[in-house]
């Protein structure tokens, strides 16, 4: 994708602080991080989001997240981390090239990743469950 910033980072046209690279992925420091060590796992092939990625590649991406999380844990002596993966503008995705955020958490860091819990009736949860099972069961 010619106008994709992450494709340009993968090709080397744009610079990045690369912390890991293999045939399938580049892992870089986020340029506007939540804090030290905020990293992004980026597939080398352009794929927009979770709805388009090949499940096997997604599996490799999340497996790599385990490796990078361990490295960040050791490098920064942190024990807490959010893994964030946004899909679509409503979710906060700003770069339409699939990526996984690794966000080290530290006491008092002020980072907000969350939602407001609701309290649906059990019958509503049952209906929602059936709706999803109707698709998964196809
Ligand atoms: P998202 O909002 O989930 O799409 O995340 C996109 C992330 O890419 C943001 O956290 C940005 O700070 C980061 N970002 C944008 N441009 C660059 C860049 N040139 N190099 C590294 N990270 C970037
Ligand atoms: Zn791209």
Image (cartoon, helix red, strand yellow):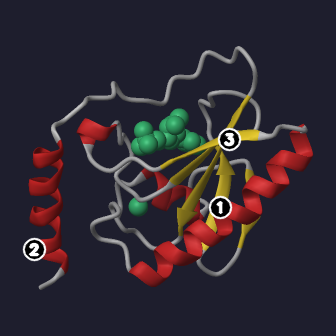
Q: Give me the residue at 40% from left, 57% from top.
A: 97
Q: Dots 3 and 1: beta carbons under 8 Å?
A: no
Rendered location of residue 52, percent (x, y):
29, 70
Q: Which residue is mark 2?
A: 134
Q: Give me the residue at 62% from left, 36% from top.
A: 31
Near-viewer residue (99 or 124): 124
Rendered location of residue 5, percent (x, y):
45, 50
Q: In this rendering, is residue 33 above or below 16?
A: above
Q: Give me the residue at 45% from left, 50% from top.
A: 85
Q: In this rendering, is residue 94 above or below 41?
A: above
Task: Give the quadrant of the N terminus.
Answer: bottom left
Specify the label residue 65 is tagged with. 1
Q: Between marks 2 and 1, how big is the CA–CA gap? A: 31 Å
Residue 13 in view of the camera: yes
Q: Between marks 2 and 3, how big is the CA–CA gap? A: 34 Å
**First along the sequence among labels 2 and 3:** 3
Q: In this rendering, is residue 63 above or below 81?
A: below
Near-viewer residue (93 or 91): 91
Badge 3: how crowded within 10 Å, few (<14), some, or many (20+)? some
Near-viewer residue (28 or 72): 72
CB at disc 1 and ligand 1 closer than 8 Å: no
For the residue labelled by badge 3, is the local secondary structure a helix, a strand or a loop?
A: strand
Badge 1: how crowded within 10 Å, few (<14), some, or many (20+)? many
2 vs 1, front mark: 2
């Amino acid at each position: 994708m010619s106008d994709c910033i992450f494709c340009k980072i993968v090709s080397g046209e744009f610079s990045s602080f690369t912390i890991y690279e293999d045939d399938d992925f580049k892992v870089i420091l986020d340029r506007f991080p939540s804090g030290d060590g905020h990293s992004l796992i980026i597939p080398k092939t352009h794929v927009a989001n979770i709805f388009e990625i090949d499940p096997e590649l997604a599996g490799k991406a999340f497996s790599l997240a385990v490796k990078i999380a361990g490295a960040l844990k050791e490098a920064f002596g942190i024990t807490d981390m959010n893994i964030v993966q946004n899909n679509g503008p409503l979710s906060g995705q700003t770069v339409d090239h699939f990526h996984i955020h690794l966000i080290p958490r530290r006491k008092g860091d002020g980072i907000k990743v969350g939602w407001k819990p609701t309290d649906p009736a059990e019958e509503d949860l049952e209906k929602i469950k059936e709706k999803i099972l109707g698709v998964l069961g196809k």
